[in-house]
Structures are given as C-alpha cells and as structure tokens.
Amino acid sequence: MPDKTLQEKAADNIRILSAAMVEKAKSGHPGGAMGGADFINILYTEYLNYDPSDMNWAHRDRFFLDPGHMSPMLYSTLALGGNYTMDDLKGFRQWESVTPGHPEVDVMRGVENTSGPLGQGHAMALGAAIAERFLVERFGDWMAHKTYAFISDGGVQEEISQGVGRIAGHLGLSNFVMFYDSNDIQLSTSVEEVTTENTAQKYKAWGWEVITIAGNNANQIREAINFAHSCKDKPTLIIGKTIMGKGCVTSEGENFEGKCSTHGQPLSAAGADFGKTIASLGGDAENPFAIFPEVADLYAKRKKQLLEIAKEKKVTEQKWRAENSDLAKKLDRFFSQKAPEFDYTKIEQKDNSATRAASATALSYFADDIENMVVSSADLSNSDKTDGFLKKTKAFTKGDFSGSFLQAGVCELTMACVMNGMALHGGIIPVCGTFFVFSDYMKPAVRLSALMGLPVIYLWTHDAFRVGEDGPTHQPVEQEAQIRLMEKLENHHGHNSMLVLRPADAIEGTVSWKMALENVSTPTGLILSRQNITNLPGKNRYEEALQSSKGAYIIEDCIGEPDVVLLASGSEVSTLVEGAKLLREDSVKVRIASVPSEGLFRRQTKEYQQSILPTGVPRFGLTAGLPVNLEGLVGENGFVWGLKSFGYSAPYTILDKKLGFTGENVYKQVKQNVLSEVLQ
C-alpha cells in the first residue's frame, strides 16, 4: 500500500477520533462521520475562512452541518483546530459535556447551528446565504463570504429539501455551496430500497450547478470546491460518493466498509473490530484520543494562515469604515443584537380593525425605519398582511437583494428554517408570516428557534374559527394550546423558551410588536385576527396596553372586590366586555382581564398575579381554542368556555352565535356555571 498523503492522514485522524467518541459513549453514529471525514478536512484546512482569535467575527465563512448525528466528525475536526480538547471528545454525549449527541450552536467553538432534525440544517444555511447577500448589497463586496452546507441522504429525502433547492436556485445564490455525502446507506436501509430519483438532475432543474465526485478523494474535493467558487450566478451541489464506515475492518482484518450497521451504533456493536479498525487507520487502539503530530502541524499552519487572512480582511474593513463612518455605525447597529430604536407611539392605528391589519400598519412604519428587518411570507402576503411591509420595499430576486422581502412560496417549514438561518448569521431581524393553522407545518423549526434562543418573529394570522367559510381545514382550534406549550417550556437559561402574544385589539397589536422586537433572546409568536375587533375601552389605550408586558392586565374593573373575573386573549376580550355589560345590569361586580401571554404573567410576582386574579374570586375564561388555553388560570372553581371540536364552514358571524361567542352567552355561562351558588 502506498504511503498516505498528509491530507489522508488528517482524514484518518478524524475517523479515529469519531469512532473512539462513539465507542466510549457506547452510542452514536460513527459510519457517516468516517465517510465524510475527507471533505470536511479539506474544507477546514484549505477553504473555510474564519478568525481563530475571533470566532464570532461577523464576516467569516459559515459551515452548517445538516445531519447532526454526524457530530463526531465536526467535533473531531474542530478539535484538530484547537477548539475542543481530547477530554471534551471523551465526554461525548455525557452530562454537562460540551459535545452533546447532536451539535448545539456554540459559535465560540465553531458550531454554527443546532442540528439533528434532518433537512433543517441546510435550510438554515440557505438563510445565512441570503443574509450575506442582503448585507453585501448594503455595505459592499468587502464583506462577502461563503456559506457551506453538509447534507446526507436523509436530508435530501426530507421534503424540506425541495423548498431549499427551489429557493436557492431561484435566487441564484452563488455564495452557497453544499456537499451531499452520498454514501447510499441509511440508518435501517440502503438508499436504493427507498428511492430511485436522479438527485443530480433534480437540483439542475432547480437551477443549481451540480458536480459528482469520489467523495473520499482529496483532489476531486478540491476541484469541486474550486468549481463552486467559480460559479457566478448559481448555487453548487457537490455530490460526493463516499463510503459509509470508511476504514472499518473485522477481527479477521477483512473489509467492513459500506455497512448499514455502522450508521447508528459503536463499531464493536456493528460487527467491525474497533481495535483493528483504529490500528488500520494508523492509530493506537489503547489511546485513540490523540492527534498525529503531522496533522497537528497541518492544522497549526492553517490556523496561522487564517489569522493572516482575517487580519488582511479586517484591514480592508477598517479602511472602509474610515471612508464610510455612517454606514459603519449602521453595520454595528445591525449586528448589535439589541432591539431597534423605534418610537412606537407614532404608529397610528385605525379604530376597530383586525389585528392582522394593525400588524400591517405597524410593518409599514418598520419598513421605513428598521432597515435590517427582513419579512417573508409563504405565498400569503396579501392575506397575512405582511404586504404592509412589502408595499414599502420589494422582494428579493436573482442578483438583486436591495429589497427586504422574501417571497418564499408555499413552504412554511422551509421558510421558518430560513429565518432561523438569518438569525444565526446575524445582522438581520427575521419575520415570517402565514395562517395560524399552518403553524403545524412550522413547529419543528419553531422548536429549534426556541432551543437556540433565536429572535425570529412568527406572524400567524387567521387565529380562530372566524376564518369562517374556509371551514375546519383552515380554522385553528388546537394550535394555540400547542404553541403556548413553548411558553411553559424553559430553555437552558431558565427562561420561557418562547414569547407568545395574542393581542386583544389594534392598540394591543402595536404593543405586541413592540414586545416582539424588544425580545432579542427567544422567538416570538404573534397570533392575529382575521376579522375586525372593537377597540377596548380606556382613556389612554396605548399606555394601558403597555401593561401587556406583564402578560395580563385589567381592562375594566369594579369598585371593591369583584364577584367574578373574566379573562381572555385576542378578540374574545371584546366579547367579554359585551357580556360584562349584561352582568352589571344584574348588579354583578365584574373585572375583565386581557391575558395576551400566560407565560409572561406566570413570571410576574405573586403580588401582581394576585392583583389581577385575587384568590377566592371565581373566574370565567373565554377562548376560541381549546379550554385548556385558560384552565390553568381559571382554576377548578371557575369555568372556561371554548371549543371541543373542529370548526364548521359558515360565515364567522354565524359561527360566533352557533358556537356561543357572544356577550349573551358570556352572561349565561357566568350566571349558570360560575355564580349560580354565589347569587343564590
């Protein structure tokens, strides 16, 4: 056997470390990591540009791993570059380890994205690539950089890949390079058992450049990346035909490559011999957690090169800053991760408007003043009213990113993941809109937004059965209960993983937007009405609505302690106001509370919570969703009127009456189910 080249030894070092991590943890996915080692090694030692002394440098190249189960490959490569220690690798998948089973965003160590659910990683990469084009358009080519994605057979099969392929090709993103680790093996089958598609032709049809190579051949990898860099108006897909479990052998020394069993378990459990595999790759089975001296030198030399490249680019940046001081201040503001400065009092809302219309009004102001906001819609901009923003700008097109709107087409999940990618890249405030019922398509991305702590704003309209004639397929019932679970789920910082707001009128809609833009540490969901809502009573409605920041506040009150507290969110609050008028005619002392966010309310002091919902006073809740939306606040001694079935197709005014969402029914239900004993 001829002597191995230095790059082959480096790739083998990644294979050894990857296999050892899984073996020690007694769980994980070694096969794919071993097969993909050659590409990631060449990428990191010859192409990927970043600043090892400033890992958060805004203008670095990005590498997005899609198959998170291949984390050993990424951790091993980053360890060769000095970002992880051998002890870190030994702690793979263990409690409080910095090397979790699937990568979790950790920019300072070189992990750009949390990945695991297949398909989302490369969609986030698309978002980062769009963000780069948006920023280059505004600040110049000096800050241009590449976005690389690594995808597997599973990611290509996930339906989200269609959205990514279509959008990237349509926009001609030549800064986007994706390596497809095509090893023909999946977790439980071979690829040929589940698909016979021509992947290359599919991506070509979407407008990509496609090149197929031997994915474990360093020279072909170089040629492919060079080719991708030469492309001027198309993204590039490099299909690398790699070998699952490359280097694996049995106890008899026989070849054990390309086996399905090595995908998702330690080599020793898969049928390979761990010790002999490590030895055949040039390692020491007794001490596999080691870096070959010549590989350490290779990565050290690359680190030195990277520092020089970054230094040169930063000199260029400083020259640009000196010549463009106002633009430089704007760029710093974009990347500050601070809420934008904006005077929300200047937003003039029309009386008694739908909260989706109120959102459109707010967006029209933001389009003028918040220059790094990017809004997207899944082919519903004129219905979810994100067109309030679009009318002040224009949509991205191939070669033109001077606008601030992404017409994503009908692909809610892809769109949401793209927004995650924009947030990860930085410099952009991402907003995406669709109907609330279609949040069902988006929840995997929303969950990762929450896990990563990304300030993506989800704008969901048509919030209830009042979608009316469209019928039960378009009428959300259970969706609010589902998304509000994210307010009950804490992130790893101990905070609510998401802020969810359902404003009760147009003014509360303005305040909800204020809260969304000021929430820079978690995603925000805005749940907005299709139909008009009567303005809530108040002397200074905006100042009163600012109390939304506490999650719940009093809309109307009585003298002394109330007989009953009525609570709701969204359009049901105005229905409570109607019901309260009837109750007062019977001398019932009523308090009405708007609860745009139970999650926020639960974070307030006990004293504040008691001031809104005093102990011992019965409560009535009204929700257009499942009763569980309010049962936690109403308690066992109260009553919630909500829906217990799917909706029906009819005009919303008819549905209000038939389903009991009227002031008259509020009066009836409070008298029968809440105050029957009190008033006897």
Image (spheres, rainbow, N blue to C red):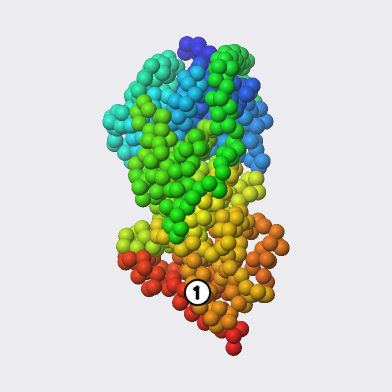
- Percent across and percent down for residue 60 are 54, 24
- Residue at 55% in and 78% down: 584
Where 86 falls versus 119 (above or below)? above
Depicted 224 relative to depicted 120: above or below: above
Q: Position of residue 573 (x, y in %)?
A: 51, 65
Q: Does residue 43 appear in the picture of this structure?
A: no
Q: Position of residue 616 (x, y in %)?
A: 67, 75
Question: In the image shown, does 367 or 551 lie closer to the viewer?
Answer: 367
Q: Quadrant of residue 112?
A: top right
Confirm whether residue 308 shows in the render. yes
Q: Residue furthest bottom?
A: 680
The residue drawn where x is 63% and y is 28% is 84
Q: Secondary structure at mark 1?
A: helix
Quarter of the image for the C terminus: give it.
bottom right
Foreground pick, 401 / 232: 401
> Is 22 in front, or is 342?
342
Name the residue that disc number 1 marks. Answer: 579
Q: Going 57% across and 22% down the picture, which residue do you hit?
A: 325
201 w.r.t. 554: above or below: above
The picture places residue 670, in percent across and down from the top left corner, at: 53, 78
